[in-house]
Amino acid sequence: MAEILKLRVILDIEEPVFRDIEIKSEDVFLSLHKKIQEAFAFDSSEMASFFMSNDNWDKGEEVTLMKMDFDDGSSSGEMKDVLINSLISETGEKMVYVFDFMLMWCFYVEVIDILPVDVNKSYPIISHSFGTAPNQYSKEVTISVSDDKHMLKNKPSTKFSMDALDDFGDPDDLGSEFEELPDDIY
């Protein structure tokens, strides 16, 4: 028998802002992703992931918008394929939802109730709203390489323009200070 999960979705900002979403337990994570976007008036233009969590809000198993292959050979479940009740189904279970990996909008999602299906409702629905959601693009981008372990292992190379070399002049005008290197140096 189908059940409805009542989820409290709290946006991680200073002001209290949350939405309660009711969704069928056998729906897929993509439906929940779309409903969260609607509930907070975001435009779904960026990547997102759900992370199964615990009482400390630690990130666990990841469900991604698109299939992702990881370094260890495993891959993520895709939102369009993974049923919500395959990962959460009980009151008190938690997830972290991250949207836009540059702006890092973070939402804390918790199952606050399990309800019977109301045949007069078309799920998923936003059953309660509290607070005013910020504009999706109101957040400033702050990039700190030290905060990202992946970037520490894979630092991007420095890019420069060849025009910057103009300050050094023409290499043919270096004069006799520099000798030609022998061909067999390598």
Image: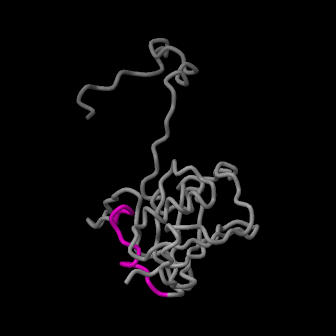
Compared with 82, 103 (above or below) is: above
Colour convention = one colour
Q: Quadrant of the C terminus?
A: top left
Compared across the picture, whether 159 is left or right of 68 comes to right
In this rendered view, identify the residue nearer to me: 93 or 173. 93
Q: Residue at x 45, y 63 (%)?
A: 31
Which quadrant of the view contains residue 182? top left
The image shows residue 124 at horizontal and vertical percentages of 50, 67
Compared across the picture, whether 107 is left or right of 68 comes to right
In this rendered view, identify the residue nearer to me: 73 or 157. 73
In this rendered view, identify the residue nearer to me: 32 or 101. 32
The image shows residue 6 at horizontal and vertical percentages of 55, 78
Compared with 22, 46 (above or below) is: above
Q: Quadrant of the N terminus?
A: bottom left
Q: Is residue 59 magenta?
A: no
What range is drawn magenta here?
Answer: 77-90
Which quadrant of the view contains residue 89? bottom left
The mark tally for this picture is: 0
Compared with 18, 134 (above or below) is: above
Q: Is residue 78 magenta?
A: yes
Which residue, as the protein is rendered here, is positioned at the far left? 184
Compared with 35, 114 (above or below) is: below
Q: Residue at x 39, y 67 (%)?
A: 28
Compared across the picture, whether 186 is left or right of 49 comes to left
The image shows residue 181 at horizontal and vertical percentages of 33, 26
The image shows residue 141 at horizontal and vertical percentages of 64, 50
Secondary structure mainly formed by the magenta segment: loop
In this rendered view, identify the residue nearer to me: 47 or 69. 47
Q: Residue at x 52, y 51 (%)?
A: 44
